Image (cartoon, grey):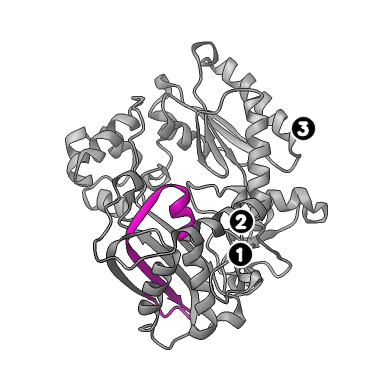
Amino acid sequence: MVIDLNSYFASCEQQEQPDLRNKPVVVAPLLADTTCAIAASYPAKAFGIKTGTMIGDARRLCPHLIVVQSHPKLYVEYHHRILDAIESCIPIGTVMSIDEVACELDRSQRSPEAITRLATQIKQAIRQQVGDCLTSSIGAASNRLLAKLASDMQKPDGLTILEPESMPTKILHLGIGDISGVGVNMARRLRAAGLDTVCKLWLADADTLQRIWGGVVGGRFHALLHGEDLPAPIRRRASFGHQHVLAPEQRTIRAATPVVRELLARAAERLRQENFYCRRLIADIKWANDRGHWIDERSFHETDDTQTLSRILMEIWSRVPAQKPLRVGVTLAGLVPANKHQTDLFERPTNAALTEAIDRLNQKFGRGTVGFGATTSSLRRMTSKIAFQRVPDLSEF
């Protein structure tokens, strides 16, 4: 069973602010027309507004649109309350994202009647324990891929059960891009191979899909699409990163510099918290006015030291073109588990005790209490963003 909260960020805002209910609302990282919607209420979606729509375009589609600046900490707080409500009905197997969870049904819960009763209990528990605005669409099937697909088939506040004997009839009306794991590029490759409908995709054999995917993932997708319940592959962490959409007054390289330094400090803190070192630093910028991206990186001997990484970042930053930035980001990659860290004989000594003391103070008194250099307190307390498949810890706010 997959439980998917409907228009989650917008629903949280509507629960907090009753005057927003039943109105076209979008949530944006900043109150600026040059940013995009990260969530839209269903009345806003009726005007053609969706996640990724530029706020300026959204206002033209819906002149009476209400734009609300995002409150990520609020959404994480609601997330934990929703998990508690679901757990009062059924154990949660996997938190898929901030607005989506998967639960394993036992044998007594697998009939359509039992699933319907359980879904009703879950929806009621969320309404009673969290709020009336937090509706969910629930899907049930023989594996998580199909349950996720089912949860998308009836929105808002729906329930769809894909019984094995009803497959593939119940999904033939969908597009191939509606299936999780089939992104824009993969959909293009499938169409180029003549698999442009769900019916053709279903009839294709595993070898064909393996060739199109270019590996065993295609064979795995075939098995899941046909109802096999395979264990999820083990995913090793590849990087730590943060991005930030700049306020209009920060959209110069000089004004963006303290922002990118704070993003680096935050990523380095997470690196140490999760016991990793890194060997590569990547800085990226999205330019304003749709002028594309800039990206640069450096490789180095593995480190987890904020000051060392900051020095490397500033070496990269010195080469940034003099254009107008819209969004900046920092990524730490080439990860090495702390128990496999090898010191460098010629490595510049770092003040590990200072770094550890700063981390402990921030953990005790709140992130941003102490920072490196001249970064202002307001920047150190910059709002954490919520990425797909990662729910920030409340200590990050």
Secondary structure at badge 3 equals: helix
Q: CA distance from mark 3 to mark 1?
A: 40 Å
Kindly check if marks 2 and 1 are in contact, taking CB atoms under 8 A apart as contact.
Answer: yes
Q: Is residue 384 left or right of residue 283?
A: right
Q: CA distance from mark 2 to mark 1?
A: 7 Å
Q: Is residue 64 left or right of residue 329?
A: right
Q: Mark 3 vs mark 2: give the one in front.
A: 2
Q: Is residue 24 above or below residue 250?
A: above
> Residue drawn 68% across and 38% down?
81
Q: Nearer the viewer, residue 129 or 211?
A: 129
Residue 385 image point, x, y percent: 56, 58
- Figure label count: 3
Q: Nearer the viewer, residue 203 or 281?
A: 281
Q: Is residue 371 above or below residue 126?
A: below
Q: Amino acid at mark 1?
A: Val
Start and end of the magenta stretch? 268-294
Q: Which residue is mark 2?
A: 361
Q: Mark 3 vs mark 1: give the one in front.
A: 1
Q: Is residue 316 above or below residue 7?
A: below
Q: Which residue is mark 3?
A: 128
- Residue 273 magenta-highlighted: yes
Q: Nearer the viewer, residue 4 or 57?
A: 4
Q: Amino acid at mark 3?
A: Gln
Q: CA distance from mark 3 to mark 2?
A: 38 Å
Q: Earlier in the sequence, mark 3 or mark 2?
A: 3
Residue 36 image point, x, y percent: 56, 67
Q: Amino acid at mark 2?
A: Leu
Within-10-Å neighbours for mark 3: few <14, some 14–19, many 20+:
few
Q: Earlier in the sequence, mark 3 or mark 1?
A: 3
Q: Earlier in the sequence, mark 2 or mark 1?
A: 2
Q: Which residue is mark 1?
A: 370
